[in-house]
Image: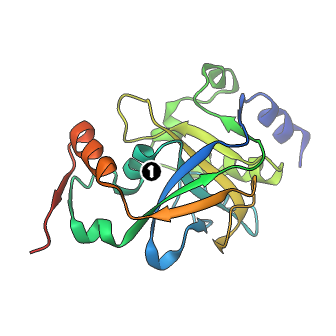
Amino acid sequence: MPASAKSDLDALPRHTYPAGFSFSRIHRIVQGCWYFSADGSGRFDPVRHNGHGACYLGEEDLCAWVEVYRTRKELTSLDLDTRRLVTATLSIPIEVIDLTARKTLGAGITNALMHGNRYESAQALATRASQAGIAGIRWYAKHDAAARLHAVALFGPAGVARTLPQGKPRARARPITADLIDRACQEFGYRVLPVP
């Protein structure tokens, strides 16, 4: 990796998730728990790092919900029944780039990278980070206007995986809980309609 790319990454703040920390992810049942996107459809896909992709998670269940359903405000019970909520608990600490820290401005990064409609710059950063062996990137979930929910893209081999490589997390999948549905409806205005 060129020295300029390394110094660019060195200027970015880091966040360490301790062993025992749990991430949340909502996924389609047919796809399995872990999928590492590398096709450019995700904001932090490392599209120019051959063989690597990004798996998108949240620091809590509500973030996983908002990252999946986004601005689609009316859902059916079928939409929820075809997905599972996964809790993945780290067995070892991992370190990620932290785009929620104010010091990112010193590296020239603003909220436009995390919330803009164009992904090229975010994907270039993800490519450099994954090539450097950094575990992932942390940012504020785009669809949370209060900027309280933290999303995370963890890097690993592109495509479907049986487990996450970082920290060898233990994963537990279950149906989306009634508590999460109620919270999403109350705090973000989602509606879950019965299937006709």
Which residue is painted at 74% across and 48% down in the image? Answer: 135
Label 1 neighbourhood size at 10 Å, few (<14), some (14-19), many (20+)? many
Q: Nearer the viewer, residue 63 or 107?
A: 63
Which residue is painted at 77% across and 42% down in the image? Answer: 93
Q: Nearer the viewer, residue 157 or 181?
A: 181
Across and down, in percent, residue 130 comes to 76, 53
Across and down, in percent, residue 111 comes to 50, 31
Q: Residue furthest left?
A: 196
Apparent side of residue 24 relative to residue 143 in the rendered image (left or right)? right
Which residue is painted at 43% across and 65% down in the image? Answer: 84
Across and down, in percent, residue 112 comes to 49, 35
Across and down, in percent, residue 87 comes to 54, 54
Compared to residue 34, the image places residue 190 above or below, namely above
Name the element at disc 1. helix
Mark count: 1
Apparent side of residue 61 relative to residue 96 in the rendered image (left or right)? left
For mark 1, what is the residue? Answer: 64
Q: Nearer the viewer, residue 185 or 139?
A: 185
Please state, as top left, top right, bottom left or bottom right, where the C terminus lies in the image: bottom left
Q: Which amino acid, mark 1?
A: Ala
Q: Residue furthest bottom?
A: 30
Which residue is painted at 37% across and 37% down in the image? Answer: 144
**Chosen colour scheme:** rainbow
